[in-house]
Image (spheres, rainbow, N blue to C red):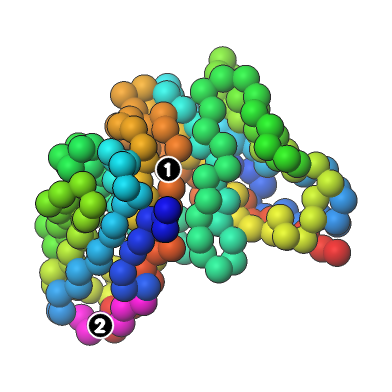
Amino acid sequence: DAGVIQSPRHEVTEMGQEVTLRCKPISGHNSLFWYRQTMMRGLELLIYFNNNVPIDDSGMPEDRFSAKMPNASFSTLKIQPSEPRDSAVYFCASSPNTGGYNEQFFGPGTRLTVL
Amino acid sequence: KNEVEQSPQNLTAQEGEFITINCSYSVGISALHWLQQHPGGGIVSLFMLSSGKKKHGRLIATINIQEKHSSLHITASHPRDSAVYICAVSDNTGNQFYFGTGTSLTVIP
């Protein structure tokens, strides 16, 4: 299996632009997680899905952030409009079963820079 | 207030030394996770445990539920163990996740 796939790996954009990050979880996994990592705040959970349904989005910082999972093999995290403070590495992870008591497999991350 | 506290924040060791990284948490948990993040940025799940001890190669993770404390041990440390080690917990519902700020480990040859 190719593991969790994220695209793009790097994204540089200007403030105010829309940014879309993509994630393909490991086939057969039922849970998908979006994380953000910054030097200041470390790793933070933004939102996660169980069986394509968003369970907890309390970590989403603002209404500018939205996430979708239209099917079991694809999810997007969108930021509109983007701001410089959104610059971070965004990780997607998937887990074979629902619930936090299962191992998570992380993608390589998308490094976002908003100028 | 951080639900998960790690210590030390930074650790430098000589190759071959025994290393311990500590994690304390303040919430009821369903599981505790140890993650490893290498300088290249990739994150790997090392352990997930809810009781007792787990061992994988030179790595050992223990957890004491009553004391709300976990330790990650590395025996015979090697420069390739240099990474950031992150402790994370999922709460009793399994739906909330809390992360420590990480321990940056450097093993010198």
In the displayed structure, A16 sits above or below B59; it is below
Name the residue type under label 1. Gln
- Evaluate whether residue B1 shows in this view: no
Q: Residue A16: where, in percent of width, then height? A: 15, 79
The span from disc 2 to disc 1 (Cα, nearest Å) is 29 Å
Q: Is residue B7 left or right of residue B50?
A: right
The part of the image, by quadrant, that contains residue A40 is bottom left
In the displayed structure, A51 sits above or below A62; it is above
In the displayed structure, A36 sits above or below B40; it is above
Q: Chain of mark 2?
A: A
- Evaluate whether residue A25 shows in this view: yes
Q: Residue B36: where, in percent of width, then height? A: 57, 51
Residue at which label 1 appears: A104
Numbered disc in front, either 2 or 1: 1
In the displayed structure, B66 sits above or below A44; it is above
Residue at which label 2 appears: A13
The residue at 42%/53% (across/down) is A1
Q: Is residue A75 left or right of residue B76?
A: left
Q: Chain of mark 1?
A: A
Q: Which residues are magenta?
A: A10-15
Q: Main secondary structure of the magenta part?
A: strand
Name the residue type under label 2. Thr
Q: Are marks 2 and 1 in contact (CB under 8 Å)?
A: no
Q: Residue B4: where, in percent of width, then height? A: 49, 37
Tell me the tag on residue A38: none
The residue at 23%/52% (across/down) is A73
Q: Residue A105: where, in percent of width, then height? A: 43, 48
